[in-house]
Image: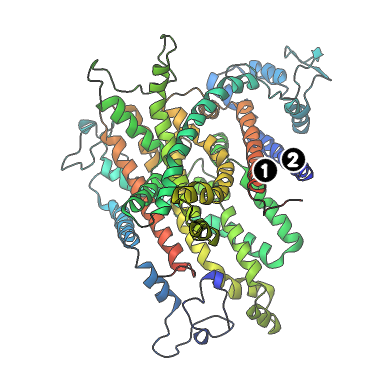
Amino acid sequence: MEVDTSTGKSSTRTSENVTGIDGEAAALGPSAESMTTIIWKRFRRHPAAIISISVLLILVVSVILVSFSPYDPEASDLSARLQPPSLQHPMGTDQLGRDMLTRVLYGGRISLFVALMVVVVTLVIGIPIGAFAGFFGGAIDNILMRLTDVTLTLPTLLVLILLSAIMREMELPLVERNSVITIAVVIGILSWMTIARLLRASYLSIREMEFVEAAHAMGASNLRIISRHILPNAISPIIVQSTLMLGYAIMLESGLSFLGFGIQPPTPSWGNLLSNAQMHMIQHPWLAIFPGIMIFVAVIAINYIGDALRDAFDPYKVY
Amino acid sequence: MVQYIIRRLLQMIPMLFLLSILLFALVNLVPGGPLAGQGRSRRIRPEKAEILKRQFGLNQPLPVQYVIWLVGNDWMMVDSDGDGIDDSKGQRQGILRGDFGFSFQTRRPVIKEIGDRLPNTIYLVGITLIIVFIISIPIGILSAVKQYSPFDISVTTFSFMGQSIPEFWLGLLLILVFYVWLTNPFTGEPLLPPGGMSTLGEEFSILDRAKHLILPVTMGLVGWVAWYSRFLRSSMLDVIHQDYIRAARAKGLRERTIRYQHALKNAAIPLITMFALDIPYIFAGTIYVELLFSWPGMGRLYYQAATGRDYPVLMAILIIGAAIVFISNLLADLGYAYLDPRVRYD
């Protein structure tokens, strides 16, 4: 049986090694490869993406290992204020004598964590909305898509600034003022719409296919069809979009923190490190250079990976 | 077509209405209401705060406040001096009649504050966009026509970098290079000014204005040049492999004519649609530029209002912002129908 070409699953497979309802590849002789293997093979053809993955891995490992840094990211050392980069302090020190390398890596931990959380929140909101709208259609589709449209008209950056300004005034249960998680959740609540729209489109086309009909005939519940039968076949655009969302979230969080409405000092984040650097950068430019390089490198690596994934999942792309 | 436009504009009304309720509720979620921040930061005595509350009408129940915000209070008696007695007719006309109230910070009408700043933003954004298109259209076309050439590869690489560079960091780097590090070899002064629209206390001169534009415009344009040249490249690639281009070539037309007249016309359709959809982001992006270069525009106004908790200004800009989103979406759809005769709305 055929699997939807638009999800990128069937193009590289022959029809006999797609089994049935669950869409798992059966081991049919030596030529049968799993989907993951095929995607990985196609992905490997992008040298920039391979470099990007290595860079990102190094970054992730170093923001984890920074716990072993001899310097404290928040304690000041006034005897070592504003030192230029040296062997002791490879990125110099800031106006309170804190080691910038340590702070930049701790900031990276925060920024990457926020970005990951944003992606999780967009998936948690976007997947059910897109799936239900596409699967059920009709009134449910209409309501959910109007909700998506209204959210899309909100100017994201402006609303984030307003929410952040308001949250500073409020004492809410469970919500810490401008904590890392609050920021991530708020960005996520304003960013799930693309995921929902993409998923809705996939569900609209997949729900008409024969294997869905077969599942219905076998008595599978709607919820089971949505989550176990259709979702695995609609996942590839979501993977690509989530990757790009990571880069977008890093940019948005650092921009917000740069403006002073995101992560608050003394907790470092790439954005508020740059914001702090503004006051001192004329004499001490290293403060402004290193955190920016980190954002730039992380975002460009993620974008290259997203681009390569898009190509790898694209059934029409010929190599 | 006229019917379609009217229907779309009518659809806009409930959406904006919903949004206005949402914004109003949000701002009033703050304990103590919108004046709370003011009271704390300026250490207003409680009795003075009471008077202020009555003067701003903040002692009324929330639904009443919302209605007044929407339609004004010139039809009812209000307490203008804050002594607890309703003594004169209200002055507010409500946002439906274009009255967004008074700024908490400057005590001037919000609409005047916006009116002062908007031209500066349009001036900056307009010049940036003109340059964006002057650069990205030829680049996009050439890199599609010469796909996989060294030129194309460097354009693609550049556009990846341009889209990944944080705008505010680019601005900091520009200030470092052109204000701190590079100096004018004749006068020894910094090569370019670090902010403002013109040199204070100097007479108007085009040269001075232009000098103040270079850095903010450069900061604003890099991301958009990267985005549009990439976008045009891919839509050109879609077009130049179509049959009608081959037919034009077979007819013996010059390659230039094919590229710029036949192919570009179709490739530009998605570009124009995309541009209309981008308008709100272009305006939102000015926050970073205007803040870094002390440009007296809307973005900086919004930032100052947010730091000073100036809720009337924040709400006005957000409502106007949402209306811009609606209108630019409508423009995108209309532009699409106008440019592409295959698209019809009814």
Q: Say left or right for A55 vs B300.
A: left
Q: Say left or right for B103 vs A304.
A: right
Where is the N terminus of chain B found, in terms of image quarters? Answer: top right
Cβ atoms at labels 2 and 1 below 8 Å apart: yes
Q: Say left or right for B146 vs A315.
A: left
Labels in figure, total:
2
- Identify residue for label 2: B9
For the residue pair B236 and B127, the one nearer the viewer reads as B236
Task: Work out whether B312 lies above or below A134.
Answer: above
For the residue pair B306 and A33, the one nearer the viewer reads as A33
- Identify residue for label 1: B330
* Disc with the residue nearer the chain's start (2 vs 1): 2
Label 1 residue SS: helix
Task: Work out whether A184 lies above or below B60.
Answer: below
Q: Position of residue A238 (x, y in %)?
A: 52, 62
Task: Tell me how far mark 2 sits from mark 1, CA to CA.
Answer: 8 Å
Q: Say left or right for B13 vs B35.
A: right
Q: Residue at x 40, y 33 (%)?
A: B218
Q: Residues within 10 Å of mark 1 (few under 14, many from 20)?
A: some
Q: Can you tell which mark lies on residue A231?
A: none
Q: Looking at the image, can residue A119 be seen? A: yes
Q: Residues within 10 Å of mark 2 (few under 14, many from 20)?
A: some
Q: Position of residue A292 (x, y in %)?
A: 34, 41
**What residue type is disc 2 on?**
Leu
